[in-house]
Image (cartoon, rainbow, N blue to C red):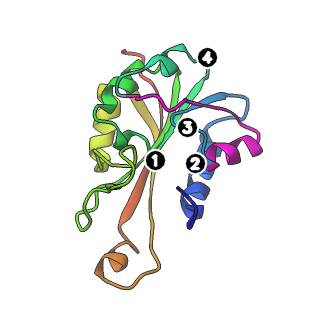
Amino acid sequence: MYEKTFPHKRYQKTIQFLESHIPKEDRILDLGVKNPLSGILKDRGYQVENTGGEDLDIDFSAVQQTDAEVVTAFEIFEHLLAPFNVLRNIRSEKLVASVPLKLWFSPAYKSDSDPWDRHYHEFEDWQFDWLLEKSGWKIESRTKWCHPVNRIGIRPFLRLFTPRYYMVYATRSKTV
């Protein structure tokens, strides 16, 4: 996936946000298969285990059976048809998750060659907040950032100041 490019800025923002909220002693279950970011987090002292590529729309066993204090989901929920279901089934007390924001000037992402690499959802921030609230999470902290691209045109210009990513730190709501 990262043969030609590497999301340095996204990884930097993600690591800074995670380090500001999650102590290195907390065990992490990262939703999604092993990836460069989970490797970087391990190198920085985190105990990270990844899910095994199961369809999280159907199989919740990884989040139900983990003893990890934290679940992370970096650009995962947009790929699920029903992210509410997996969010509701997480047993860990902390969640750090990021999603790409819906951009009015760009269609949802779809890979023609990889059926797993498609966005069913691209959220507005309030939609993701609502999803988390309805599935039993309380947002403690949030951040957004832009993702400029090195191209010329109207859409690349709009990406200079339009937030593309949204990340939250949430805790399990006591009312669930």
Q: Are marks 2 and 1 in contact (CB under 8 Å)?
A: yes
Q: Do the residues labelled 2 and 4 touch (CB within 8 Å)?
A: no
Task: Identify the mark nearer the N-term, 3 or 4.
Answer: 3
In this rendered view, identify the residue nearer to me: 169 or 105: 105
Would you place residue 51 above or below residue 79 in this image?
above
Task: Identify the mark nearer the N-term, 1 or 3.
Answer: 3
Mark 3 or 2: the one toward you:
3
Task: Identify the mark nearer the N-term, 2 or 1.
Answer: 2
Q: Do the residues labelled 3 and 2 touch (CB within 8 Å)?
A: no
On residue 91, which mark appears? none
* Residue labelled with disc 3: 33
Q: Distance between the residues labelled 2 and 1?
A: 8 Å
Q: What residue type is labelled 3?
A: Val
Task: Identify the mark nearer the N-term, 3 or 2.
Answer: 2
Under circle 4, the secondary element is: loop
Q: What residue type is labelled 1?
A: Met
Q: Do the residues labelled 1 and 3 touch (CB within 8 Å)?
A: no
Q: Residue at 59% of width from left, 55% of height from top?
A: 11
Under circle 2, the secondary element is: helix
Q: Distance between the residues labelled 2 and 4?
A: 22 Å
* Residue labelled with disc 2: 17
Mark 1 or 3: the one toward you:
3
Q: How far apart are marks 3 and 4 (CA)?
A: 18 Å
On residue 67, which mark appears? 4
Q: In this view, does 172 lie to the left or right of 28?
A: left
Residue 145 shows up from this direction: yes
